[in-house]
Image (tube, rainbow, N blue to C red):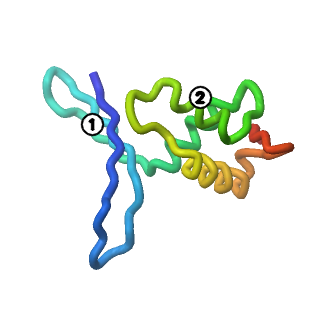
Amino acid sequence: DGETVQLVSRKANNYDHLGRFVVTTTWFEGRLGEVDLTPYSVVLADRIAETIAPDPLTVAEIVDRLNADEDEGGVKAGSVRTALRRGLKANRFTIADDRWGLS
């Protein structure tokens, strides 16, 4: 039906480091149909927004909820903090008493 994979370019000799991306593939009748490439930070910010929509949470609580359905690895607290800070600058997230919420 479809598959989502995280793609990380670990080597950058003559160009800037590209960062992480999420690649989503869609298959139709056994053939590759569509490939969608999205920056990981955008996908993570969307997942965080869904997690904190009902009520504001701390970074640790956000990480725990995001990792509850992960099979391996999971999301790290540093990645969540970075996404939250970027969202704070873009007026997407708010913070009060160490609890992050939606704007």
Q: From the image, tell me which residue sits under label 2.
A: 65
Q: In the picture, which quadrant includes the C terminus?
A: top right
The answer to which of marks 1 and 2 sits earlier in the sequence is: 1
Report helix, strand or loop for mark 2. helix
Q: Of residues 103 and 16, which is closer to you in this image?
A: 16
- Mark 1 Cα-neighbour bin, 10 Å: few <14, some 14–19, many ≥20: few
- Using the image, determine if residue 45 lies above or below residue 51: below
Q: Residue at x 32, y 49 (%)?
A: 7
As drawn, is 55 to the left or to the right of 4?
A: right
Report helix, strand or loop for mark 1. strand
As drawn, is 101 to the left or to the right of 28?
A: right
Q: From the image, tell me which residue sits under label 1.
A: 34
Residue 21 in the image: x percent, y percent?
39, 50
Q: How far apart are labels 1 and 2 at the CA level?
A: 30 Å
Q: Of residues 1 and 76, which is closer to you in this image?
A: 76
Q: Quadrant of residue 3?
A: top left
Q: How many marks can you see?
A: 2
